[in-house]
Amino acid sequence: MSLGWVQGLGLRSVRFVATLGQLTAFLVLVFRATFSRPVRIRRFVDELYQVGVVSIPIVCVSAATIGMVLALQGYSTLARFGATSNLGAVVGLTLIKELGPVLTALLVTGRAGSAIAAEIGSMVATQQLDGLRLMSLDPIDLEVAPKAIAMLVSMPLLSALFIVVGLAGGFMYSSIALALDSGAFLSSLENAVVFRTDVAGSFVKSLVFGILVGLIATYRGYTAAPHATGVSAATTSTVVHASVAILIFDYFITALWEVRWL
Amino acid sequence: MTDPSLEKAHVDIVNLRHSWGDRVVYDGLSCRFVEGKITVILGASGGGKTTLMRMIACLGPPDFGDIWVGDQEITCMPERQARRFRRKVGMMFQSGALLDSMTVYDNVALPLREHTKLTEDEIRDEVHAQFDSVGLENVDGLLPGELSGGMMRRVALARALIMKPEILLCDEPFSGLDPPMVRMIEALLVEVNRRLGVTMLVTSHHIGSTLRMAHQIVFLCGGGAVQGPTREIEHSTDPRIAGFFASGDGGKGPGGQPPPPGEFEPS
């Protein structure tokens, strides 16, 4: 009984390490395809539209809501300490350092990451990738790399949009619904946020999340079993694995970044 | 008809062994495909017909054995070399394998855009000539999802032929088609073989079409292959082959009627 448990653990560990190795090899292939000729600008722009532009509405709606909730929650907490003039700093730092990059990454994983995995997975299932290979074309060059790079480029831009819209939502709520002084909100925000630490850290996070989501989504799609169940499993595992990876990497990046600037 | 063993082999399979998990697919499979002829690969479902096609297209290596194409051994080619080799091969997939995101025109033009320096006007002429040769018109702007089964096969054939391959692999080209469309695809394949002299390997369950179009038959069974000219295999006394033919349409055309004369004339 106990031996079976150890065997199971060993098998899972070996599979995990093997997957990490395959993922690394896949990353190298994507990287090589990205910098090989011909440069596929049109494919990249198409994918940028699918990943980035189509995600804008969901990012804006979520960001405005989160900004208002932060203002409301922050106000009720700060009011206990008579520090409501610091509401701009609370909303701003929370959005810039944490919620902006993390929530954007989670939203984009659910919307665009799952779509990428499903699209590539269904291309595997319907032999479209084999069709490309038979035409002496590299599916990683033609289909995978443009999607992964579009995700990498979109993520920081969407994260910046999330932060701006979130701040606008928080500002509007505090000015209109809470009737706070808008000048105090803006000046506390301006005084609290430091570009070199807070904004740059947020940018680094969103870049890393872009790489993670792009890589996991394309890899899961590319290695999907060639049938409908395989495609749905690839889509589900993309959302689960990318979400967990985002939260784990968020902790490590935050820890390393804060130590760096302490 | 000449015995295939006496003619020049274009593709030579030597002592292939392959398994899927515990299930042995090939156990010492050897067969040869004659240059410029149509060979139909028959066998039960799950007998490894499509797997053999994929191996010949360098889309997956066998566990053991050699595959020769002309003087070149392609069994375990590195991907870069395999990509060069595949320019000699065209494949008509059972599902069509057309890219969903592109129009029919772009699907067929893609290999020319990627591998040649032709201008867009020259590409347009080539693609339309290919459409004409497979009997398609006014399909440029359609997406693959808007095509019927027969149109899909013809577009797939046009794409497979656009780079003028030496070997054409056709995986189940007749499955899911109505009898007139089966006749049409059959006629197209025979015409392509006659016009281009391309070596053609076709997997099929359709006995009538096989008997009408094949120069030779490779029958996969028991992990190996029985091979011979079409009439010889048709009248084989091997119980596995005789049973297979007896279970089909007996070489008659769709609807149980013998094929009419001149059936292979292009429409």
Image (spheres, rainbow, N blue to C red):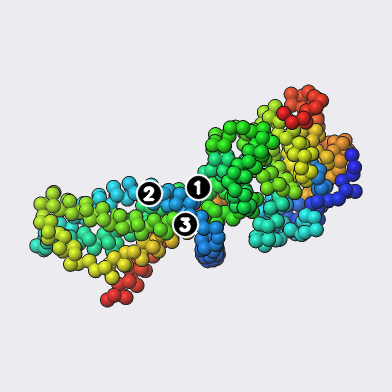
**In the rendered structure, the residue with mark 2 lies on which chain?**
A
- Image coordinates for residue B56, horizontal then vertical, percent: 73, 52
Residue located beneath label 3 in the image: A148
Distance in Å between CA atoms under marks 1 and 2: 18 Å
Looking at marks 1 and 3 on the same chain, the residue that comes earlier in the sequence is marked by 1
Could you tell me if residue B75 is visible in this image? yes
Quadrant in which the N terminus of chain B appears: top right
Q: Amino acid at mark 2?
A: Val
Against A201, residue B27 (above or below) is above
Residue A53: which disc? 2
Against B39, residue A250 (above or below) is below
Against A242, residue B167 (above or below) is above
Which dot, 2 or 3, sits closer to the camera? 2
Distance in Å between CA atoms under marks 2 and 3: 15 Å
Residue at position x 52%, y 43% in the image: B101
Mark 1 on the same chain as mark 3: yes
Mark 1 on the same chain as mark 2: yes
Residue at position x 75%, y 49% in the image: B166
Asked if the residue under mark 3 is in contact with the one under mark 2, i.e. CB atoms within 8 Å, the reply is no
Residue B163: which disc? none
Q: Amino acid at mark 1?
A: Glu
Residue located beneath label 1 in the image: A119
Looking at marks 2 and 3 on the same chain, the residue that comes earlier in the sequence is marked by 2
Against A68, residue A245 (above or below) is below
